[in-house]
Image: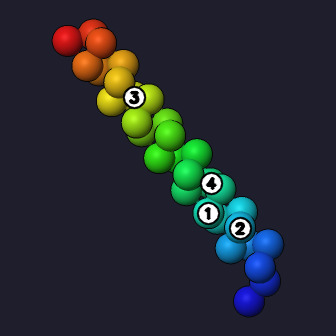
Amino acid sequence: MSHTIVVIRHIRLRKLNCTIKQAEVWHTMEA
């Protein structure tokens, strides 16, 4: 198993979590 693949996957997951958190913040600001 390549270490780079794991790192890329981890970074993508973190970016996804950041986007979701940002979306939640936008929702609370709108409400």
Q: Amino acid at mark 1?
A: His
Mark 3 and mark 1 lie on one chain; the one further toward the N terminus is 1
Q: Is residue 18 above or below residue 30?
A: below
Describe residue 17's horizontal placement relative to residue 4 as left or right.
left
Q: Which residue is mark 1?
A: 10
Describe residue 22's horizontal placement relative to residue 6 as left or right.
left
Describe residue 15's horizontal placement relative to residue 23 as left or right.
right
Q: Which mark is residue 23?
A: 3
Q: Secondary structure at mark 3?
A: helix
Mark 3 and mark 2 lie on one chain; the one further toward the N terminus is 2
Looking at the rendering, which quadrant does residue 31 occupy?
top left
Graded by Cα atoms within 10 Å as few (under 14), some (14 to 19) or many (20 or more), the crowding at tag 1 reads few
The label nearer to you, 2 versus 4, is 2
Q: Which mark is residue 12?
A: 4
State if disc 1 and disc 2 touch (CB < 8 Å).
Answer: yes
Q: Amino acid at mark 3?
A: Ala
Distance from disc 2 to disc 4, alpha carbons, whole Å, reads 9 Å
Distance from disc 2 to disc 1, alpha carbons, whole Å, reads 5 Å
Mark 3 and mark 4 lie on one chain; the one further toward the N terminus is 4
Q: Secondary structure at mark 1?
A: helix
Count how many numbered circles sit on residues in the image: 4
Graded by Cα atoms within 10 Å as few (under 14), some (14 to 19) or many (20 or more), the crowding at tag 2 reads few
State if disc 4 and disc 3 touch (CB < 8 Å).
Answer: no
Q: Amino acid at mark 2?
A: Val
Q: Amino acid at mark 4?
A: Arg
